[in-house]
Amino acid sequence: VQLQASGGGSVQAGGSLRLSCAASGRTFSGYTLAWFRQATGKEREFVAAIKWANSNPFYADSVKGRFTISRDNARSTLYLQMSSLQPEDTAVYYCAASRTIILSNLRVPSAYNTWGQGTLVTVSS
């Protein structure tokens, strides 16, 4: 599967954005999907993940209550609704996928074998 992320942009603090990640090549069937982000000079960090069965999603503490991850398996599209954005949310956001990941590795970037190209989110104060 190939992933294409979109929806990034520039917003002021308190604003909202919705990121999308479309799959091509094959469907999302059986894949666990996630969003990560990487700010300039920092390591890539986990944002949110959702398993194939649309069970309870997982969030980083820093985004819990502000971001919502969802997936449309019929459209093979992953979303990240971001609200109450803060300057510290500024980063390149990446979507990722894996069919073989285990629960304990959901937050580990190296556990995902398919990545989108990233979309830049800039939040100004």
Image: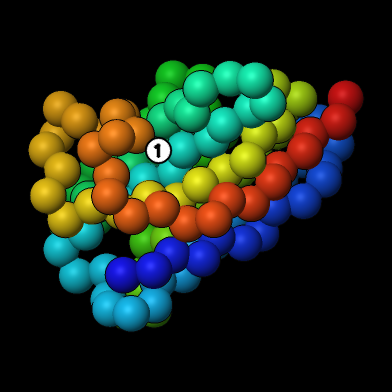
| Left or right, 13 with reference to 8 | right
Q: What residue appears at the point 46 percent right and 70 percent down from the top-left corner?
A: 22
Element type at mark 1: strand
Packing grade of label 1 (10 A; few <14, some 14-19, many >=20) is: many
Q: What residue appears at the point 46 percent right and 27 percent down from the top-left corner?
A: 45
Q: What residue appears at the point 37 percent right and 61 percent down from the top-left corner?
A: 71
Figure colour scheme: rainbow
Image vertical order of residue 80 relative to residue 88, above or below? below
Give the number of callouts: 1
Disc 1 target residue: 48
| Left or right, 37 with reference to 90 | left
Q: Position of residue 25 (x, y in %)?
A: 33, 80
| Left or right, 122 with reference to 106 | right
Q: Position of residue 47 (x, y in %)?
A: 45, 33
Q: What residue appears at the point 46 percent right and 38 percent down from the top-left corner?
A: 36
Q: Quadrant of the N terminus?
A: bottom left
Give the amino acid type for the residue marked by disc 1 in the picture: Ala
**Viewer can see residue 122:** yes
